[in-house]
Image (cartoon, rainbow, N blue to C red):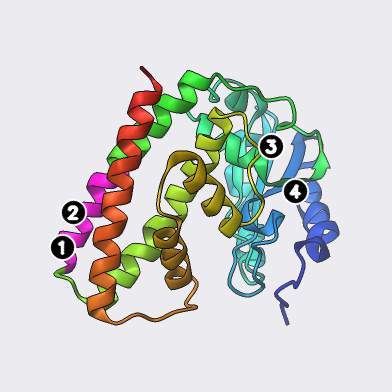
Amino acid sequence: MSRIPKDPKEIFDEFIADYKAVYGNDLVSIILYGSAASRDYRPGESDINFMIVLTEAGIKDPERSFKLIKKWKKRMVATPLFLTEDYIDTSTDVYPIEYLNFQKRYVPVYGKDVLKELAFTKEFIRLQAEREIKGKFLILRSAYLESAGKRAALIHIIGRSLYSFMAIFSALLALKDMETPQDRRSLITETCRVFGLDSLIFMKLLNIREQRIKPDEKELNKVLKDYLNEIEKLSKIVDKLGG
């Protein structure tokens, strides 16, 4: 029977052996990232995310991973992110936030540490942050309108959107040359302090997302409107950071 690991480290040896057997010398590195590489990991609830870096030749044959992906999904391992070193090196200007977040929460599992030496241009970070915040704000407002204020729909909106904004929070702290806290609550507290946001609203959103509280429909509508107001405020703050 497939067992969901209490600690992702429990599966490292077997996971490495499986991918070594399939890719051999084409396997450059395996990296654990995301919540499974932090104190936010919750067995049975959190996906386990791996980045698998292959040679240019190895990446051409993705079908070699079909059976392994199916096998490991039974143990909460999400479909890995397959990359090459060249793809990483040529993407930090257009996706700095994604790579910053990889770099903030990761564990090298096998082979070369391809994230350690990555460097980022602050203006690229700010531009992507502004673009992401403004785009996600429009999506959030549209989703709220489509929800007709119904409780189930509002819960779904919070669950789908909150972690995306928190990924941007990490990048915003990097703009201020600040270390990113390793747990979500500390990340919220620090970002709200630095950028003048209402931490109580985001804490409430996180508690709803994690099912720690279950507000009624009226309270959820108030929370969503407060959420929209804070994100709109943040978009204006980040815009001004660029002069």
The residue carrying mark 4 is 22
**Mark 1 is on which residue type?**
Glu
Query: Counting residues from the N terminus, which is met first, the one under dot 4 or under dot 3?
Result: 4
Residue 108 x %, y % = 79, 44
Which residues are the magenta region? Answer: 136-147
**Mark 3 is on which residue type?**
Val
Q: Residues within 10 Å of mark 2 (few under 14, many from 20)?
A: few
Query: Counting residues from the N terminus, which is met first, the one under dot 2 or under dot 4?
Result: 4
Image side of residue 51 versus residue 93, left or right: right
Query: Counting residues from the N terminus, which is met first, the one under dot 1 or under dot 4?
Result: 4
Query: Counting residues from the N terminus, which is met first, the one under dot 3 or under dot 1?
Result: 3
Q: Secondary structure at mark 2?
A: helix
The residue carrying mark 1 is 146
Q: Quadrant of residue 114?
A: top right
Q: Residue 53 shows which numbered tag?
A: 3
Q: Secondary structure at mark 4?
A: helix
User: What is the spatial separation of the Cα atoms under label 2 and label 4, in whole angstroms?
Assistant: 45 Å
* Residue situated in front as seen by the camera: 121 or 27: 121
Q: Secondary structure at mark 3?
A: strand
Q: Quadrant of residue 144?
A: bottom left
